[in-house]
Amino acid sequence: MSKVLVFGHKNPDTDTITSAIVYAYLKQQLGVDAEAVRLGEVNNETLYALEKFGFDSPRLISNVAGEASEVILVDHNERQQSADGIEEVKVTEVIDHHRIANFETSDPLYYRAEPVGCTATIINKIFKENNVEVPSNIAGLMLSAIVSDTLLFKSPTCTEQDVQAGKELAEIAGVNVDEYGLAMLKAGADLSDKSLEDLLSLDGKEFTFGEAKAVIAQVNAVDVNDVLNRKDELVSLLNKNIEENDLSLFFFVVTDILNNNSTAVVVGKVAEAAAKSFGKELVNDLVDLPGVVSRKKQIVPVLTEGL
Amino acid sequence: MSKVLVFGHKNPDTDTITSAIVYAYLKQQLGVDAEAVRLGEVNNETLYALEKFGFDSPRLISNVAGEASEVILVDHNERQQSADGIEEVKVTEVIDHHRIANFETSDPLYYRAEPVGCTATIINKIFKENNVEVPSNIAGLMLSAIVSDTLLFKSPTCTEQDVQAGKELAEIAGVNVDEYGLAMLKAGADLSDKSLEDLLSLDGKEFTFGEAKAVIAQVNAVDVNDVLNRKDELVSLLNKNIEENDLSLFFFVVTDILNNNSTAVVVGKVAEAAAKSFGKELVNDLVDLPGVVSRKKQIVPVLTEGL
């Protein structure tokens, strides 16, 4: 049997990287020759989690064609968020917690999506369904993913299932959730030494809303002014990106992880319409989004509706 | 909470009808106000199963918009196989065992597809995962679905999981699998008194292969000559259907359930190419398909590749 690659989305976050590692581990226990790989740079939050639990970053790949004939997607399904060359390989499984779009197969597959806060919460169930024990360091990775995706259980995407899985996994991993969780989030949210180019490459996801091709990026910050003080320079960069990639919208969200609010820097020809989707006016390219912390639950559906 | 409708594909078969009934029952046990409905006439095989285990046919609906705001799809996902008006309601769950195509949501959902022979095999797992007991008559319906979709465990789509689920459910239902299964299949496969119009409406599913819009229909027969003796008349009917629905292909499969072979009546402007996909020549609008019994596993992938 040839190797199966397991990977999450481009611009990887903690759930994407750790779910690839954890699910590859589970498949290995079930006799599959699985390897976790990644499609981009690992961010500081994820590095903190990997180091804490003794893992290296997965191997970086750029194009999946030629690397393997079968792949498993975690934490995403949309073609434009996946590996280059994805149309040339067979997707045999998807484990995800996002909407389904721009995804098509010619054969039946195992597709497991649940409307929970984190891919790791679903993978934790699949361990149980297959009677595979969760080792302590693997539990630590899954806990890190849940803390990251739910902002320490505070995001509206967080479900009771995520909370329960988090508790259970913290016990197996032997860590205090609140202490470890805040330390991990802060490791990723110190933006003071980040260049704007770094921030841009961190977390952009591409979406299509009607006719509009859009990128929504989100960064977590302990101090949002680390970004907003450089707004004019950021707007120039976003405009450049829009031109290069023929976008109608760049929606750049800075989330205050201590107070659970966001501010978005919004540019592109449908920027005004995007702001209006939230019932807001665009002021100096900015939209205040009080209480908004979830791209998936509080931003994508609003823009899908509004554009 | 408003009512959630549960339904399978158009031109319903036994798995689609019984999975809707069974999954609605499971959701009811979990506190959801769910109702099974159907999108077309119930065939003789399904009627036999419903009667045997004491169920009525679900309510027939034509357009889902206005009937409910939330729906659960079983045994299908492709838009063109689903209810009219499907784009106006929210799909909250899908339980299926087919490829994924022409399916898109704006929100995360519960999507459970597994590459097994029958939707009921997956639903049987979901009962266990939720610790809900399977009553005897519900087990009978699930067994009927498995027997139907796997042609009594003989189809190449049949997996070890389907065999195990079938055994387990037969015991709960208190029936002899082979005796009951063959009787049920025969009830659906006696085509001697069927008009060709009846046959056409039985089981057509629409697919898109590249540019080609196609319908693949399949009927099970105890005696394939019940259909093939009326071939010329059937070809006229298929051509009429092609014209009315702007199709490039009508691929009408007659499957001999006792010997596990099929013959296809193939018409439309890509008929020759369709036959070539199987390495065959079209002879008098007919293609012999020895050993072929599964549309999903032995026909759709071949046409996807070939057209």
Image (cartoon, coloured by chain):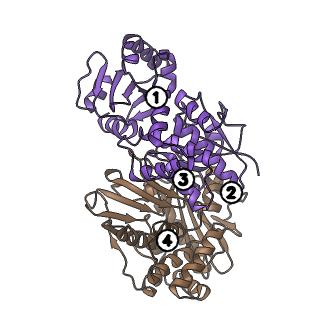
Chain colours: A purple, B brown
Name which of mark 3 and mark 1 comes first in the sequence: 3
Three-letter amino acid code at disc 2? Answer: Leu
The residue wearing badge 1 is: A186
The residue wearing badge 3 is: A124
The residue carrying pointer 2 sits among few (fewer than 14), some (14 to 19) or many (20 or more) residues within 10 Å by Cα, namely few
Residue B111 vs B61, above or below: the answer is above
Element under disc 4: helix
The residue wearing badge 4 is: B15
The picture quadrant where one finds residue B36 is bottom left
Question: In whole angstroms, how far apart are the C-alphas of marks 2 and 1?
Answer: 36 Å
| Left or right position of A2 against B224 | right
Three-letter amino acid code at disc 4? Answer: Asp
The residue wearing badge 2 is: A30
Residue beneath the point at 33% across and 33% down: A260
Residue beneath the point at 46% across and 40% down: A147
| Left or right position of A219 against B181 | left
Element under disc 3: helix
The picture quadrant where one finds residue A17 is top right
Are discs 3 and 4 less than 8 Å apart at CB? no
